[in-house]
Amino acid sequence: MDNGTKLQKNRIFIVLLLIIGVLAAWNLRLFWIQVAASRSLTERKIDLVENSVIQRAQGLVLDSGRGDFTDRNGVPLTGTEQKVLVVFPIREEASAGNDTAAAMDRVATIVNAPLSAWQSFVRQLKGPAIWSVSGRPVPLTAAQAVKIEALGLKSVRAMTFKQRYAERQQASQVLGFIGQNPERITRQFTDQFHKGELQLTSKIGNSGLEKTFESWLQGIGPSYVSLFTDGLKRPLPGLDTRQIAPSNPYYPLKVVTTLDSGIQRRVERSLERLHVTEGAVVVLDIRNGDTIAMAGTPAFQPEHVDLARGNWSNKALKAVAPGSIFKTVTAAAALEEKAVKADETFECTGALGKYGFTCWKKEGHGKLTLEEGFTQSCNIVFAKVAQRLGGNKLEAYAHRLGLEMHVGWSGDVPHRKAFRQWDAEEQGQIYAAASDKSDEGALVQTAIGQRDVLMTPLQAANLVVTLYNQGKVASPRIVREIRFRNDRLYQSFPSHELEQAAKPIKPATAKRLLGWMAATVEHGTGKALRSAKWSLAGKSGTAQVKLKNGRPGENHWFIGYGPAEKPRYAAAVLVQNVPEGGSHRAIPLFKEVMDILADSSEK
């Protein structure tokens, strides 16, 4: 054998050894993945077998795992559980005596669906889906669920689904809505984003309580059903469908609000029945300021939010011109400062005689005391009183009564400093920044709640609570506590007074103003309320505003309490942007709200 042949054989041998070495290394690598790696990953709670199967799984979320809201009595406000029809895109294997096509058509009959719509829905399926109409899952009755399961089909199942929002969601402006907000996730929830607990596509609270309580509402994972199929969309034996859910007795948390869902529902219906297209109603517990009901219109559906329209914004927290309900502040200042003698009278001829300032009663009220001026809502009386007080004192007493500031509950809680329950609450104003408080023309307008004065319905209702509590300004709650899933207490929010409020007015002054409110209903501008189920007390207001079309309009207000003899509730109602000159629309709304409260108290 020559040297050339021998060298060639050596090279072939070396190449074979290299191939054998590569194959051996490959097999060792596979062995490591199947044995060593699986053991290592198991310690880290990663199941390779399970993950390989999941690659052939299609999932449908049945419950997002987000925490829910309840009313004060534990009645759910979000997260209604219902049976729905879940349809899977799998090939059914026909069996003797079982016509799967006919069985699928029978499903349409059971759920009262047009056959053509049902067949089209099934044909277009790419993954598991819930039978829905107009984008909302169709709830099944118990009888329908039994009939569907009795068909024995693997492609249709009656399953429990949690619908976050109802079709007519109660307190929608209070609760707010959830949606994608990548910018806020990276800015406000940076740690959770980096840990993978939140994705840029995650839905978070974007308004209302959904936003302010976001960190408590985030769950520990969704509950979902997965369909496991082979490449031909046939169910894998022993797997096919499997429900997967976090197993934790403590989460998600539930947020217990101060609302009464029964009262809330009826108040919202009253706004509809009285054709209030723009306005708000706030009902507070007069003892501590807890929010019993809060409704705004136009309402909105949290699952279909038009950001540009703005109806998702809580009307009860937006500051608008208050008109004569602000005379309560002017009267308090006059009494505290002794600017008016007990038996003093003022002459109202219908006009002040300067600044173009007039009374709503063109012919004038004649001679009136301050109390009579309050009950008759005489502009001239309050203009003359304000001339004695001056702008600085008027603003100072507004502060003492909890105006021109955020009044909603705030305080320190674990891991959160100066936490505010209310989202986007406005503080209102008495004078605009550039206003001259020494300008008497501006002063007389301010005294009757015009010019620059702005007040929220929440502040207006809380003003009545403040008077009842002898001048101490409450800080209204909307959430009472947070509880674990098993109902154990997680976090409470105790009621408290408003720390930012200045020195309160005297109890005697507050009591006197409450009496004047009762007289307003007895023989003043609130006489129409004498037919209510309860004896009531309050103060009316009409503010001059300009409508969007440029024409003159009005805000109609009424604030007050009931029953007058033993007060339980304070309320403020606002009918906003009404064309000028019509009947006062807030008074009948206030009456209806108080009748609802009277009915609920009898149960």
Image: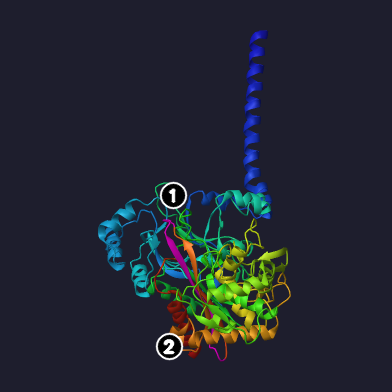
On the image, numbered disc 1 is attached to which residue?
230
Point out residue 501 in the picture as x, y percentages from the top left corner: 70, 71
Q: Quadrant of residue 327?
A: bottom right
Q: How is the rendered protein coloured?
A: rainbow
- Residue 552 is covered by the magenta coloring: yes
Q: Secondary structure at mark 1?
A: loop
What residue lies at 52% left-to-right and 51% top-to-bottom? 54
Point out residue 594 in the picture as x, y percentages from the top left corner: 48, 83
In the rendered image, is residue 298 in sight?
A: no
Tell me if residue 66 comes above or below residue 567 in the rendering.
Answer: above
Q: Quadrant of residue 490?
A: bottom right
Residue 161: mark: none
Amino acid type of the residue tagged 2 in the rendering: Ser
Front-most of residues 158 and 553: 553
Q: Assign the N terminus to one quadrant of the image.
A: top right
Q: Residues within 10 Å of mark 1 (few under 14, many from 20)?
A: some
What residue lies at 64% left-to-right and 66% top-to-bottom? 404
Point out residue 127 in the picture as x, y percentages from the top left corner: 42, 52
Front-most of residues 116 and 46: 116
Q: Quadrant of residue 532?
A: bottom left
On the image, numbered disc 2 is attached to which residue?
531
Tell me if residue 588 comes above or below residue 411 in the rendering.
Answer: below
- Residue 513 is covered by the magenta coloring: no
Q: Secondary structure at mark 2?
A: helix
Which span of residues is magenta-colored? Answer: 548-565
